[in-house]
C-alpha cells in the first residue's frame, strides 16, 4: 500500500495488536489518515497455524496465541511500510492498543536482549528465546475457573472482588491466567522476569525496555484496585508470590514512556525524538479514539462484541466490568463483553448466505423485524455474557426448534445478538435508547450494521 508522499509534517502512528491481525494507522496533525496497513496472522504467518489468530486447545476451554507470531507480525508490518516508502523520520510519536487480558512472560535475561537489539537483524530472530511461555493465554480462554474461585474466596467473595478490581473473577482476566501458569507450569513461571499485557508488551518492543502496564488495561486483570490505582495486595497475594516485582508499577494510560529505541532509529529511520506513549487495551483505546463523552454508548463489533461507555463513578456489579478511564485517570469506563461476535456471524454467513455479506444483508432486508417470533442464541464457544454455551433457537410459541430457514437464521442471529447486548446493558442501568450510539470495529462498516442499530 503506497505511502502518501509530499508533506514533511509530523505524523503519529497507532498500532493495534488485536486477536486476528496487527494493524497500523498513520495520521497527520489534522487527524487525516496518511498511511495504513495490516498483517493477517492466519494467512500471512501460516507457519504459526492459528485460526482466527488463536489456538483453541483440545479441552475447548484453553485458548492461546504464539507470542513470537506477534513479534514476527511487527517485523513484517514495518517491512511492508518501508517497502511502501513510508518515511519513519516523520513520526513524532507512536502508541497503540492490544487485545485485553492476554499475558506475555519475558524470560530471565530478556531485558538485556531487548536493550541491545542488532539493527541488522529482525526482532523475531533476536527474541526467539526471550519468552518463558511461548503460547500466551488470551482473552478467549475460559480454563481458569478454579483460579477464579480461589481468588474470589481470598478477596471475600465475588462482589467484594468486584468492588476492589471492578469485576468479579473472570476466567480470561490476567491475574487468574497468571495463577494458572504458576500452578501448571511452575518451571516456566520460575524462569519469568517480567509479565506484560499485550499492550505493554507492544510498547516494550518499541522502547527497548519493559513498559509499564497502564491503569485502564491493568483494570482487566482482577489485580488492580481501581480506586487507588495500585495493585491490590489481597489479589497479588492470592495470585502468585512476588507478583508486584514481575508486573512493575502501573501508570496513567496517557503517560509518555520514553523515546523509541535505537533499534528502530538505526533499522527503520525513526527520529531519535520519537516518543512512545503508553499502549492500552483495545476497548479503552476505542473509547479514547472515538472521543466518547460521558453519557455516550459505543458498540464495538469485532472478534468479541463489546458495549462500553464513560462513567464518572465505579458501579461494579456481578456482571460486566468497570475499568479505569484511559483518558481521565480519575474517571472510569463500564464494559460488557460478548465473546461470540464476528466469528459466529461469519459462520452463519458461510452456512446461510453462501459466504457473502451482500447475501447476509439481503436476508436481513427480506425478513421482517421480529422475525415472525423466531429468535436464536448462538454461543459457539463458552460465552462471557451470559456464561453459557450452545446453539438455542426458539419459534413464535417459544418452542425450542432444531433449525430455521437460512434467511430466518440470519435474522435470528442478528436480533438475538443485539437484543442480548441491549438487555444486559439496560440491566446494568445503561440507557441505550436515549443516547448517542457509536459503532466501531471491523464489522461496523458492513451495510448490515444499519440493521443492527435498529435493535439497539
Ligand atoms: O475480553 C475483552 C474485553 O474485556 C475483549 O473485547 C478483548 O479485549 C478482545 F481483544
Image (tube, grey):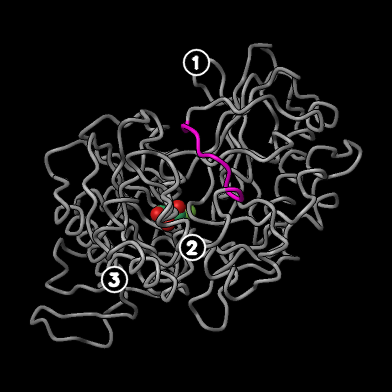
Q: Does the magenta stretch include residue 423?
A: no
Instruction: Give the prevailing secondary structure in the magenta stretch.
Output: loop
Q: Residue at x 71, y 42 (%)?
A: 77
The residue lying toward the viewer, choosing from 82 and 55, is 55
Which residue is the extreme one toward the right? Answer: 120
Q: Confirm if mark 3 falls within 8 A of ligand 1.
A: no
Q: Residue at x 48, y 44 (%)?
A: 281
Q: Confirm if mark 1 falls within 8 A of ligand 1.
A: no
The residue lying toward the viewer, choosing from 241 and 136, is 241
Q: Is residue 302 visible?
A: no
Mark 2 vs 3: CB contact within 8 A: no
Say above or below: 262 vs 420.
above
Q: Say the numbered circle drawn on residue 30.
A: 1
Mark 2 vs mark 3, foreground winner is: 2
Q: Position of residue 383 (x, y in %)?
A: 35, 70
Tell whether 153 sits left or right of 240: left
Q: Say the numbered circle drawn on residue 239.
A: 2
Q: Where is residue 226 in the image (x, y as percent from the top left)?
A: 35, 43
Report the magenta residues as a range.
245-253
Q: Residue at x 27, y 88 (%)?
A: 402
Q: Which residue is drawn at 33% across and 69% down?
A: 153
Tell whether 181 sits left or right of 274: left
SS of the residue under disc 3: helix
Q: Earlier in the sequence, mark 2 or mark 3?
A: 2
SS of the residue under disc 2: helix
Name the residue beneath numbered marker 3. 407
Instruction: Tell me the CA gap for discs 2 and 1.
Output: 45 Å
Amino acid at each position: 500500500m503506497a505511502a502518501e508522499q509530499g508533506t514533511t509534517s509530523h505524523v503519529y502512528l497507532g498500532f493495534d495488536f488485536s486477536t486476528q491481525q496487527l494493524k497500523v494507522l498513520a495520521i497527520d496533525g489534522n487527524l487525516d489518515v496518511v498511511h495504513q496497513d495490516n498483517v493477517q496472522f492466519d494467512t500471512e504467518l501460516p507457519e504459526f497455524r492459528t485460526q482466527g489468530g488463536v489456538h483453541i486447545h483440545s479441552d475447548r476451554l484453553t485458548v492461546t496465541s504464539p507470542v513470537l507470531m506477534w513479534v514476527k507480525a511487527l517485523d513484517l508490518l514495518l517491512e511492508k511500510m518501508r517497502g511502501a516508502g513510508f518515511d519513519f523520520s516523520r513520526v513524532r510519536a507512536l502508541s497503540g492498543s492490544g487485545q485485553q487480558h492476554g499475558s506475555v512472560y519475558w524470560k530471565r535475561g530478556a531485558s538485556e536482549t531487548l536493550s541491545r537489539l542488532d539493527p541488522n537483524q529482525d526482532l523475531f530472530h533476536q527474541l526467539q528465546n526471550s519468552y518463558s511461555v511461548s503460547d500466551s493465554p488470551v482473552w478467549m480462554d475460559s480454563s481458569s475457573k478454579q483460579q477464579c474461585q480461589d481468588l474470589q474466596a481470598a478477596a471475600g467473595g465475588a462482589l467484594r472482588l468486584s468492588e476492589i478490581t471492578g469485576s468479579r473473577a473472570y476466567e480470561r482476566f490476567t491475574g487468574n491466567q497468571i495463577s494458572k501458569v504458576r500452578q501448571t507450569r511452575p518451571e516456566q513461571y520460575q524462569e519469568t522476569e517480567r509479565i506484560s499485557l499485550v499492550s505493554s508488551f507492544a510498547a516494550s518492543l518499541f522502547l527497548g525496555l519493559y513498559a509499564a502496564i497502564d491503569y485502564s488495561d491493568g483494570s482487566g486483570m482482577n489485580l488492580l484496585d481501581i480506586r487507588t490505582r495500585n495493585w491490590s495486595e489481597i489479589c497479588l497475594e492470592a495470585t502468585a508470590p512476588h507478583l508486584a516485582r514481575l508486573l512493575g508499577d502501573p501508570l496513567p494510560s496517557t503517560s509518555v514512556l520514553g523515546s523509541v529505541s535505537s533499534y528502530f532509529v538505526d533499522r527503520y529511520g525513526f527520529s531519535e525524538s520519537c516518543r512512545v506513549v503508553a499502549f492500552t487495551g483495545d476497548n479503552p483505546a476505542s473509547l479514547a479514539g472515538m472521543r466518547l463523552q460521558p453519557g455516550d454508548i459505543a458498540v464495538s463489533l469485532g472478534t468479541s462484541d463489546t458495549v462500553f461507555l464513560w462513567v464518572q463513578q465505579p458501579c461494579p456489579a456481578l456482571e460486566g466490568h468497570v475499568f479505569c478511564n484511559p483518558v481521565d485517570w480519575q474517571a472510569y469506563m463500564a464494559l460488557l463483553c460478548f465473546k461470540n461476535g464476528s466469528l459466529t456471524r461469519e459462520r452463519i454467513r458461510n452456512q446461510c448466505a453462501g459466504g457473502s455479506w451482500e447475501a447476509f444483508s439481503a436476508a436481513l432486508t427480506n425478513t421482517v423485524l421480529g422475525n415472525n417470533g423466531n429468535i436464536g442464541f448462538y454461543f459457539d464457544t463458552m460465552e462471557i455474557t451470559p456464561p453459557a454455551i450452545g446453539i438455542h433457537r426458539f419459534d413464535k410459541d417459544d418452542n425450542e426448534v432444531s433449525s430455521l430457514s437460512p434467511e430466518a437464521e440470519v435474522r435470528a442471529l442478528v436480533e438475538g445478538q443485539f437484543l442480548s447486548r441491549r438487555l444486559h446493558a439496560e440491566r446494568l442501568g445503561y440507557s441505550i435508547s436515549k443516547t448517542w450510539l457509536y459503532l466501531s470495529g471491523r464489522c461496523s462498516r458492513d451495510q448490515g450494521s444499519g440493521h443492527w442499530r435498529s435493535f439497539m
